[in-house]
Image (tube, grey):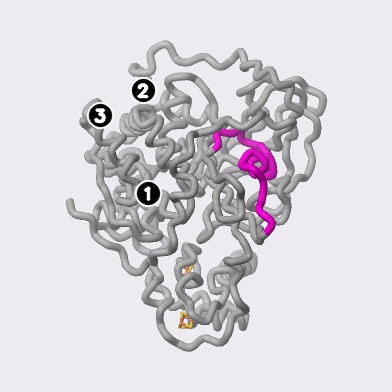
Amino acid sequence: MMPAPFHGGVHPYEGKHLSRGSELTAPPAPAHVILPLRQHIGQPCIPCVKVGDTVQLGQRIADNEGLSAPIHASVSGTVLAIETRRHPVFGEMDAIVIANDYRDTPCAHIQPPTEPAALTPQQLLAAIRRAGIVGMGGAAFPTDAKLRSGMGRVDTLIANGCECEPYLTADETLLRRRCGEVLAGLCLLQRVLQPKTTVLAIEDNKPDAIAAVQSTLEQFPQVQLQVLPTRYPQGSEKQLIQSVTHREVPPGKLPGDVGCTVVNVATCHAAYRAVYEGRPLTERIVTVSGDAVAQPKNLLVPIGTPIGELIKACGGLRDNAWKVIAGGPMMGIAQRDLDAPVIKSTGAIVCLSRAHEAAAGTACIRCGRCVRACPVHLQPLYLYRFACAADYAALWRQHLTDCIECGCCSYICPAKLPLTEQFRSAKHALKEAKL
Ligand code: SF4
Ligand code: SF4
C-alpha cells in the first residue's frame, strides 16, 4: 500500500549527521543511579527495598498493581536513599538512589525461559510485564497493558522506527546494530496480537537502517518494511497509522479503535531481551547531540544515570550552551538540573547553543501558517488567544485536548509565539479544572 500523507507537518533542520556515524559507546558506569518511582503512564511504583539494602543488577526494587510497570536496579550496590529527586519530565518525584558497587552482580532470579518459542500469549504478556517494559519512544505506556487492550481487535501491528525528531539517532543505531533482535522482538508481539499485517515503518532519511532491515527481513517473512517520506511528526502514533494504513484515528479515540497497535522499535528490542534472555529493562540507548555538546554520540547507559554524566561522556558542554533538553527539540523538556536521570522513555539529550535562542515573540500577523502545519487540524492562532485569556470554555470548544504538543505551530510561526508551550500549560489547567 502506498503511504497516505497526513495533514500538515513541517521539515525542521534534521541535525542527525552529528551523531549518526558514531559507534555505540558505553561510558564509564555512574557512581550512583537515580530511579524515579514514576517512569510510565499510570500508577507510580511503591518501593520494595529500603535504605541500606544490598541490591543486584536486574532486581525488582519497586512495583505497583493496576496500570504500572515494575522498576529494576540498573546497577548492583546499596540503596543509598529513597527521597525526592529531580525528574526529567515531572520536575520532582520520589526516587530510589543506588550507590554503584561496580560489580554488576546479576540478580539470581534472572533466568531466560527454557523454551521461548513455546510461550503462550499470556505467558509472553507476563514476561513483558515482569521485565518492566514501557513504550520507549517517549509515551511510556506499560507495554503489556497496551498489548492486552489490542488483543482480539487489532489487525495491524506497526513497529515505529521513524524517529522523526531532529538530532535523534538512537532507534536508527539500534536498527543498524541489532536489527535481528528488534525483528525477533516484534514477532513476539505479533504472537500476542495475531494481526493480519505487521509493518516496520522507517522514514526515508535513514538509508543505513533501511539497508539493515532489508538484509535481515528474509528471516522474518511475516514482517513488511514500509519506507515513509520524511516529514515531522511522521512518528507520532496517529499520523503514522494514517500513513501506513490510510485510517484516521478520530479525536478522543485510540489506535485500537481503528484496529492498530503501534510500538517503538526499542520497545520491540526490550521484549526480545525479556523473553529470550530473561533480562528486565535496565539500560537503553540515548542520543546525546546538538551544537552545544563537544562530541555527539549514541550511548548505551543504565537507566537512572544522571544526564550530566552523559554530557561528560561526550566531552562536556561548549561555552555557548543555552539549553539542555531531555528528548528532541520539538517535543522534549528543557532541563533545569543536570542531576535529573535518564528514565525508560529518554531517547535523547539535545544540547543547543545560544544560536537557537528565539527572539521575543511579536504579535500574531494572522498568516495562517500554524493552521496549515497542525497535523490534527486545530487552529493554533485562536487557541493561543484563548489560552492567554485563560478562556477554558473556548479552549474546550476549539478542541485543545486534541493537541499532541508536536511543536509544529511554534516552529513555523514567523511571530515566534510560544504556542506549544502555552498549549501545554493550558491543557494542564484544563485537566486540573476537570473541564
Ligand atoms: S503562524 Fe503565528 S503569526 Fe501566523 S497565524 Fe499562526 S500564530 Fe499568527
Ligand atoms: S502543538 Fe498542538 S496546536 Fe500546535 S501544531 Fe501541534 S497539535 Fe497543532
In the image, which residues are magenta?
299-319
Locate residue 377, reporting x and y percent.
37, 72
Amino acid beneath label 2: Thr
| Among the two numbered marks 1 and 3 on one chain, the one whose residue lies closer to the N terminus | 1
Cα separation between marks 1 and 3: 20 Å
- Say which element carries label 1: loop
- Residue that numbered label 3 is attached to: 220
Crowding near the residue tagged with mark 2, few <14, some 14–19, many ≥20 C-alpha atoms within 10 Å:
few
- Residue that numbered label 2 is attached to: 120
Crowding near the residue tagged with mark 3, few <14, some 14–19, many ≥20 C-alpha atoms within 10 Å:
few
Q: Quadrant of the C terminus?
A: bottom right
Marks 2/3 in contact by CB < 8 Å: the verdict is no
Residue 386 within the segment the image draws in magenta: no
- Say which element carries label 2: loop
Front tag of 2 and 1: 1
Marks 2/1 in contact by CB < 8 Å: the verdict is no
Locate residue 95, reporting x and y percent.
72, 39
| Among the two numbered marks 2 and 3 on one chain, the one whose residue lies closer to the N terminus | 2
Task: Mark yes or no: residue 36 visible.
Answer: no
- Residue that numbered label 1 is attached to: 162
